[in-house]
């Protein structure tokens, strides 16, 4: 078992451009913090706009040769990446916990999830097909081919430091695209380590370039407006996503947007309550609640509200909060003081409007950013946390009477990523699923993420899908050749 220091020291800290590790312009650096202690873990390169352009130069330079690489070779690199991640899962998980805070067991689950994207897209790389069609008049023929989009710009958030990148890099590599990847400044280490692993797996220079920076807007906007990049894939908040969509309109870039969520979780009186409580725990507490898929609003039919609330509160109250590297910890710190204070404000606002605290609602003292797992009952519609992403371990409960009312409350949001539905009535399950305005639904289960499934949202939760058999389409253009047959 390696120590925390050894894992940090073994992680690259420079920019990865054109297959080489190099310092940022002017040797600028930025500090990476441990959210469990508030102390600095290490420093990484802090890229300037000129460094960003160098990364795009490298991606553009490598594009033609990479697109011509045999699909099988691209697939083998992805497969080898999956194997390396599996072999090194313990070290990768510890590194992730140090920079992001979640318990090591959860980081290990994320490493496995991220690795599965590489395995999945290793298999997809050799299945890029096309078409041949006889024209309706019987004379012409249509030949349809699918080709890589070209150099891509990829931007990922801090909450899943490896998986959100893997969901983009996997299909981009499989399709034959090169890329500039910009991870969040708060969690750059997992991505830098992944770039090292992919190089070991055989990825040629220039295909994946990684820039870490404290100036994400200053570095990325010129690249988005550059004209040589052909695609922008972003995972993050709806607010930033909107801004990037505007910038991307300049060059009419292909865009994929995985944005914020405000997931409703519906528990009907006919539900299996064991499953509903288990599902709510998973949907709420995966990643400490810092997930776009986190159940943000829990609606429970009145007849089972008391029992559900009691059981959920017992489970939430029993969770052990602490530094994610320690044994037996269920919930780590939030990512920073700002996020912890936002969660506190949202809870205070709900309580001020009449919500009752069943458990939690306390901030832990000390340097880490801890907030107690919290259950609130009787949360009114006007509470801010019914509209805003909580991104923390807070479960707000609201009662409903009828199916009609539950669906209306669930859909009363500009977001549309995922919803969860607990019922034992098949007709109700189908009826409600058809009416819920979200890209994904967990039916009697609290998790939907799966590399083999199309992940993504509707409304202001995003554009496009990641994973599944359609995930690679985001990185492919369709070209058709019209053929005249005499
Ligand atoms: P964020 O503030 O939008 O940041 C996401 C990424 O964008 C980070 O790398 C950030 O870099 C970068 N960024 C910020 N401003 C930018 C700009 N002007 N130009 C270019 N890049 C910019 O979101 P976050 O707080 O990191 O992540 C939480 C959000 O992500 C939540 O809303 C969550 O729902 C969403 N999310 C969605 C999914 C999904 O699949 N739908 C998955 C995970 C998370 P810096 O932080 O270094 O500035």
Image (cartoon, rainbow, N blue to C red):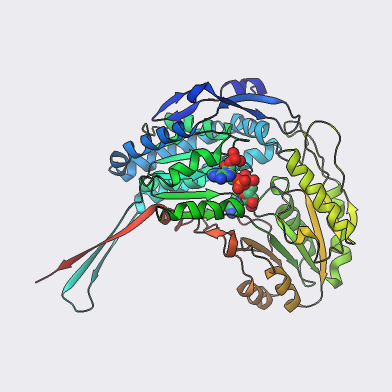
Across and down, in percent, residue 445 comes to: 68, 60
Across and down, in percent, residue 277 comes to: 78, 58
Question: Which quadrant would the N terminus be assigned to in this image?
Answer: top right
* Residue drawn at (90%, 55%) of the image: 358
Q: Quadrant of residue 60?
A: top left
Q: Is residue 246 left or right of residue 295?
A: left
Q: Is residue 424 left or right of residue 436?
A: right
* Residue drawn at (84%, 55%) of the image: 349
Across and down, in percent, residue 395 comes to: 79, 55
Compare residues 202 and 90 and report the one nearer the observer: 202
For the question of whether residue 51 can be seen, the reply is yes
Q: Is residue 216 left or right of residue 311?
A: left
Q: Quadrant of residue 189?
A: top right
Q: Is residue 266 left or right of residue 79?
A: right
Compare residues 204 and 281 and report the one nearer the observer: 204
Classify 332 as above or below 171. Answer: above
Question: Which quadrant would the C terminus be assigned to in this image?
Answer: bottom left
């Amino acid at each position: 078992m390696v120590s925390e220091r050894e894992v940090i020291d073994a992680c690259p800290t420079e920019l990865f451009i054109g297959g080489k590790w190099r310092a940022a312009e002017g040797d600028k650096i930025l500090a990476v913090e441990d959210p469990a202690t508030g102390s600095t873990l290490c420093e990484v390169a802090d890229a300037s706009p000129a460094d960003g352009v160098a990364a795009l130069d490298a991606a553009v330079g490598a594009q033609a040769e990479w697109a011509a690489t045999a699909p099988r070779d691209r697939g083998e690199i992805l497969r080898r990446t999956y194997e390396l991640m599996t072999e090194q899962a313990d070290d990768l998980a510890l590194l992730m916990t140090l920079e992001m805070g979640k318990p090591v067991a959860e980081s290990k689950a994320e490493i496995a999830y991220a690795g599965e994207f590489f395995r999945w897209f290793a298999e997809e790389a050799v299945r890029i097909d096309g078409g041949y069609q006889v024209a309706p008049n019987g004379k012409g023929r249509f030949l349809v081919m699918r080709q890589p989009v070209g150099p891509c710009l990829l931007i990922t958030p801090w909450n899943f430091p490896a998986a959100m990148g893997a969901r983009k890099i996997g299909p981009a590599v499989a399709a034959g695209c090169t890329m500039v990847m910009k991870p969040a400044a708060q969690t750059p280490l997992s991505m830098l380590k992944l770039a090292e692993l992919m190089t070991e797996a055989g990825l040629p220079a220039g295909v994946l370039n990684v820039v870490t920076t404290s100036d994400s807007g200053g570095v990325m906007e010129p690249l988005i407006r550059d004209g040589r990049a052909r695609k922008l894939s972003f995972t993050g908040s709806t607010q930033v996503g909107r801004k990037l969509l505007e910038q991307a309109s300049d060059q009419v870039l292909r865009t994929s947007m995985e944005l914020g969520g405000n997931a409703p979780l519906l528990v009907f009186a006919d539900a299996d309550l064991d499953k509903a409580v288990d599902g709510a725990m998973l949907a709420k507490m995966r990643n400490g609640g810092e997930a776009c898929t986190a159940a943000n609003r829990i609606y429970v039919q009145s007849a089972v509200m008391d029992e559900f609330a009691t059981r959920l509160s017992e489970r939430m109250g029993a969770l052990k909060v602490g530094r994610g590297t320690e044994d037996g910890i269920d919930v780590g710190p939030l990512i920073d003081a700002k996020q912890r204070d936002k969660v506190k404000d949202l809870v205070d606002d709900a309580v001020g409007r009449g919500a009752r605290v069943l458990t939690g609602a306390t901030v832990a003292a000390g340097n880490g950013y801890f907030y107690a797992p919290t259950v609130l009952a009787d949360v009114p519609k006007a509470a801010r946390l019914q509209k805003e992403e909580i991104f923390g371990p807070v479960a707000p409960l609201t009662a409903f009477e009828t199916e009609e009312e539950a669906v209306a409350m669930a859909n009363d949001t500009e977001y549309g990523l995922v919803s969860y539905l607990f019922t034992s009535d098949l007709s109700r399950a189908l009826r409600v699923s058809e009416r819920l305005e979200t890209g994904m639904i967990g039916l009697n289960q609290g998790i939907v993420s799966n590399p083999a499934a199309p992940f993504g949202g509707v409304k202001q939760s995003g554009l496009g899908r990641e994973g599944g058999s359609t995930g690679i389409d985001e990185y492919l253009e369709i070209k058709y050749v019209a053929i005249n047959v005499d």
